[in-house]
Image (tube, grey):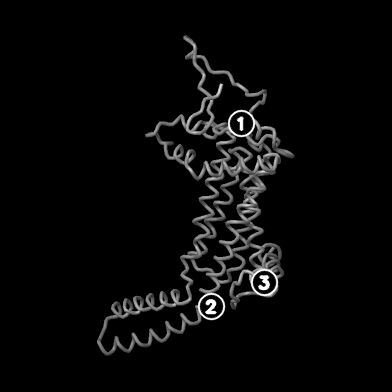
Amino acid sequence: MLCRLGGRWLRPLPVLQHGARDRPLAPTSTGGVKHSALPVWAVASVSAVGSGGPGSWYEALATSAPVHGMEEVLLGVHTATGLPWWACIGLTTVALRGAVTLPLAAYQHYILAKVENLQPEIKNIARHLNQEVAVRANQLRWSKRVARLTYLKNMRRLVSELYVRDNCHPFKATVLVWIQFPMWIFMSVALRNFSTGATHSEAGFSVQEQLATDGILWFPDLTALDSTWILPISVGIINLLIVEIFALQKIGMSRFQTYITYFVRAVSVLMIPVAATIPSSIVLYWLCSSLMGLSQNLLLRSPRFRQLCRIPLTKSDSGTPYKDLFAAFYAKFISKK
C-alpha cells in the first residue's frame, strides 16, 4: 500500500512482530521483479538519516528542488516518447548537453579566443610599463620591492581595463563549469533516487521496477551493478581521452596547468572503481555525458563550426585541427614505443 508524502509516493516501513526484533528481515521483491544486491551505501534510503546525522546533507540534496526537477524531466521524456529507460537516459543526456552545455562551451571558447588575441597588446603594455617604473624608481629612489609592487598594481589595472574594453574577462569562461557540474550532480542523484525506489511515477508505478527491466545488452537491469565493468571502464577511457585532447592542444602549459592535468587524469582513473559500485543507470548517464563531452570538444575544433559560432580567429588556430590532433597523439603515444 502506498502513502503520499510531500508530493511523492512512499511505501510504509514493515512492522516487526513481537519477538522478531532479533531475526533478520528476509529480502523482498516488488511486483515479481527480483532486485540485484547493491552496496549498503548505495541503497540506503536517504530518509533514514536524521536531520542532524552525518548524511543530512545528502538527504537535503536528494530531496532538493533541482534534483526533483531532473526527476520530472526524465519522467516527462519517458512518458512523451515511450522509449525504454536506457534510451530515455541517453536521449535526455544528449538533449541537455546539446541545449545547455554546448552553447556555454562555445561561449567559453569565444572568451578564451578574445583573451588570447589580447596577449600581444598585454606584452607590449608590460614592456612599456616596466620601463616607466624603472625610470620612476631611479628618480624617486624606490626600493626593488616598492618598484615591483607598483608595477604589479598598475599592470593589473591596465589588463583589467583591456578585459572591460573587449568584454572578455577570463572569469566568464568558467560559466560552463558552474552550470555543467551541478547539472551532472543533480542528474546522478535523480537517477539514484529512481534506482533505489525513492521516487515513484505519478501513476504509482515504481520507477525502480521499470528500470530493472529496461536495460539493454549486458546490463538489462539498470538498478544493478555492471558486473562486467564494461561501463565503468568505458567512462574512465572516454574521460582520459578528453583530458589528453586538452593536453595535446596546449603547447606550453604552466606548472599549475600541468598539475591540474595530472589531477584530472587521476580523477578519471578513480571514477572506474566508483562507477563499479553504483547502479548501471547512473553509470550509463556518466558514459553518455562523457561521450557528448568528447564530441563537443572535437566539434569545437572545427574551423567551420567556430566560424558559425563567431569565435574569433587566433594565432594558434589550425586549418587542419583533426590532422594535427592525430599527429600529436601519434607522436606522444605511438611513435615513442
Q: Mark 2: which amino acid?
A: Asn
Secondary element at image label 1: loop
Secondary element at image label 3: helix
Secondary element at image label 2: helix
Relative to 105, 81 lies left or right: right
Marks 1 and 3, how far apart in space? 49 Å
Q: Quadrant of the N terminus?
A: top right
Percent across and percent down for residue 163 are 45, 74
Residue lying at the far left of the rendered structure? 140
Percent across and percent down for residue 259 are 50, 61
Marks 2 and 1, how far apart in space? 56 Å
Taking depth in this image into account, of 42 and 277 the one nearest to the observer is: 42
Q: Mark 3: which amino acid?
A: Pro
Percent across and percent down for residue 265 are 57, 55
Percent across and percent down for residue 175 are 50, 60
Q: Which residue is mark 3?
A: 303
Q: Which mark is residue 203?
A: 1
Kindly identify the residue that appears in the image at 67 percent across and 47 percent down. Answer: 90
Kindly identify the residue that appears in the image at 49 percent across and 62 percent down. Answer: 174
